[in-house]
Image (cartoon, grey):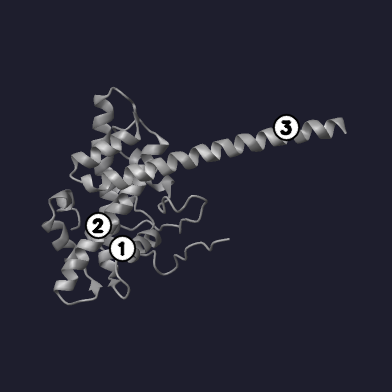
């Protein structure tokens, strides 16, 4: 049986952006048959999809594809940010690397202004 | 208790794992950066959903389907995701089909067993 991902100590994000209280998140078990296809819990993705008032229903395939797309997105943005860190000769990705990566790519324009 | 969409973050552990696997060994990520990526991922879902929903509405459908999401990826300039997503979708459909067949087979076997038990 695969172990549940430990969330202690790592799940509290004291970001302090706009004074919003971070909702404590229970560590979501990600071990499931077929997890090789998608690591993100589909239920969470579905919750985000349903948060859109214009969305009536979403098929299971759509949720799955979105989850996979998010994974690709995270990989892409992490790699872009890493390029920025490398230029600064650092081995730790910082927030500013992410900001630079967002500014540099047109497709990340929708993220600008979201992070503050 | 109203939850804003931005509060629905994806699990940090999974986000962290995806980031680490995308980067070379020995590279770390600050908590701030990881948190920012997590929020960006949530925003991405909302943004992609909204765009996909437009395609669904154009098609006069009320249910978002996979092709709506794929169309949204192209629309949002994430064409590079389309091919891997199509492959993932194929694999997912095969798996779902396999699961369905397996559970149908199980049911058949169970019925057979029940029948033979009743006879015995």
SS for callout 3: helix
Q: Local crowd at mark 2 within 10 Å, few (<14), some, or many (≥20)?
A: some
At a point 26% along the width and 47% down the height, the residue shown is B81
- Residue B111 bears which disc, if any? 3
Q: Quickly name the residue at label 1.
A: B22
Q: Chain of mark 1?
A: B
Please check whether the numbered discs 3 and 1 fall on a single chain.
Answer: yes
Q: Going by the image, does A107 lie left or right of B28?
A: left
For residue B55, what is the image quadrant? Answer: top left
Residue in front for this viewpoint, A52 or A73? A73
Q: Which quadrant is the C terminus of chain A positioned in?
A: bottom left
Q: Chain of mark 2?
A: A
Marks 1 and 2: CB-CB under 8 Å? yes
Furthest toward the right, the residue is: B120
> Is A92 rendered above or below residue A60?
below
- Separation (CA) of disc 3 from disc 1: 48 Å
Q: Which quadrant is the N terminus of chain A positioned in?
A: bottom right
Q: Going by the image, does A2 lie left or right of B19?
A: right
Asked whether residue B104 is in view, the answer is yes
Q: Quickly name the residue at label 2.
A: A76
SS for callout 1: helix
Q: Local crowd at mark 3 within 10 Å, few (<14), some, or many (≥20)?
A: few
- Separation (CA) of disc 2 from disc 3: 49 Å
């Amino acid at each position: 049986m695969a172990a549940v991902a430990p969330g202690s100590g790592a799940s509290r994000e004291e970001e302090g952006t706009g004074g919003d209280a971070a909702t404590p998140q229970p560590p979501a078990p990600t071990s499931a048959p077929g997890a090789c296809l998608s690591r993100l819990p589909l239920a969470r993705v579905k919750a985000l999809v349903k948060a859109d008032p214009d969305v009536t229903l979403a098929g299971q395939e759509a949720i799955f594809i979105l989850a996979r797309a998010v994974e690709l997105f995270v990989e892409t943005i992490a790699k872009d940010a890493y390029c920025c860190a490398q230029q600064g000769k650092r081995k730790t990705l910082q927030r500013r690397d992410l900001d630079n990566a967002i500014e540099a790519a047109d497709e990340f324009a929708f993220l600008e202004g979201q992070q503050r | 208790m109203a939850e804003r969409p931005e509060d629905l973050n994806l699990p940090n552990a999974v986000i962290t794992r995806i980031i680490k696997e995308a980067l070379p060994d020995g590279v770390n990520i600050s908590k701030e950066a990881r948190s920012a990526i997590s929020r960006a991922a949530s925003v991405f879902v909302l943004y992609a959903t909204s765009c996909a929903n437009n395609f669904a509405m154009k098609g006069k459908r009320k249910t978002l389907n996979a092709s709506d999401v794929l169309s949204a990826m192209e629309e949002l300039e994430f064409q590079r995701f389309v091919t891997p997503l199509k492959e993932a979708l194929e694999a997912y459909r095969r798996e779902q089909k396999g699961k369905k067949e397996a559970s149908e087979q199980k049911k058949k076997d169970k019925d057979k067993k029940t029948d033979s038990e009743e006879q015995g």
